[in-house]
Image: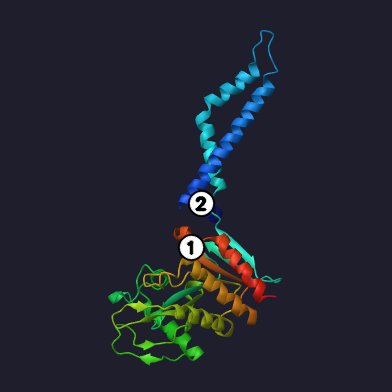
Amino acid sequence: MSYINRFLSWIYYAVLINYTRKRVWEIFQTFFLLLGAYWTLIEFSSFLLEKFQSPEGHTPYKDALRNFVWNHLLVEFLLILLISVFYNRRRLSHCIKLNDSDLAIEFRFCDLFKQKGAKVIAVMDTFDTSFSQNLVNRNTLHGKVISKYYSGKEHILDREIIDSLARTGATPTESNPNLKGKKDKFPIGTTVVVEPNSEYFYLLALTEMTPTGNVIVKPEYLVDALSNLWQYIPTHGRSIDTINIPLIGKGLHRLPPEYTHQRIAREIANSFVTSSKQQAFCKRLVVCIHPSDGEYVDLEKLAGYVGHLKEYEFQ
């Protein structure tokens, strides 16, 4: 059943969604290219079959071919269209090895929660877990972790966070009594581990909580958070081959407009490559891109960018 589900997911993500103008135009071009090739083949076959004539001068084989083509014209058009769509399907992943070992970065259109391995979730610097007063939005990945694994058991999540902070000796930078939820604020990049239902999550402090209940995020927060995350994992994290990270900083309270999906993916890759040069802490980093963001991300360009990075970083 899992193979069927994976196949259906592949069909959905690769073929059925995100038809950009560029993709439609490429399908249009492929369709007429194949149609032209098909018609040329029919004409050439007709030319050859014309030599086979009956005593009465008829060309039965040529006529049969022509009749078949005209009688099934709609089916042939649909088949050519399906081939064109399949040929121009979206590539769902691109994996680049960083050196002669098995260390690699993969950019993948996928659902983060369906991936194997450790998963990174961006949270606020207070590590709030309550949906009340909109401290945590249910539609964010942070909110989905709570809804999926800790619904009605937020106190268990709070305990896991406290224990994880204590194990690493993390201390708050300030305690603000004006905050609506938790009062203690930790440095950007502070990371905790939670393990619901045998899953393994890194909760990474990326945004700053304000007294209004909203959070803010700045470009420097992204750099600091990633740097601290890569330092945390080999020291305090579990040895897991694959780490999955979404395009952090593109949520409801997001980075400035110049930080596009493409740029954030590059920032993640750049930070990972730089850190891995000093110390490898996993075999594969998977940058998880939600399929609905497909029109904003060019996997080929990202692969090319990482290719340039490894030339300079792993010489």
Front-most of residues 287 and 195? 287
Residue 240's spot in the image, x, y percent? Answer: 59, 75
Structural distance between the alpha carbons of marks 2 and 1: 14 Å
Tell me the residue at 52%/34% (across/down): 77
Q: Which quadrant of the structure image shows residue 309?
A: bottom right
Q: Residue furthest top?
A: 56
Q: Is residue 188 left or right of residue 95?
A: left
Q: Is residue 67 above or below residue 143?
A: above
The dot on residue 111 is: 1
**Which residue in the structure is indicated by mark 2?**
8
Q: Which is more N-terminal, label 1 or label 2?
A: 2
Looking at numbered disc 2 in the image, what kind of residue is underneath it?
Leu
Give the vertical position of 260 relative to 5 (above or below): below
Residue name at image x 63 percent, y 67 percent: 307
Residue closer to the observer: 3 or 70: 70
Location of residue 40 in the rendering, given as x and y in whole percent from the top left corner: 62, 31
Specify few, some or many for label 1: CA neighbours under 10 Å numbering under 14, 14-19, or 20 or more: few
Asked which quadrant contains residue 91, the reply is bottom right
On screen, residue 184 versus residue 64, left or right, reads left
Residue at x-position 47% and y-position 78%: 222
Task: Classify residue 6 as left or right of residue 283.
Answer: left
> Residue 314: horizontal and vertical position, in percent?
68, 75
Query: Going by the image, does 70 lie left or right of 258?
Result: right
**Mark 1 residue type:** Asp
* Quarter holding residue 271: bottom right
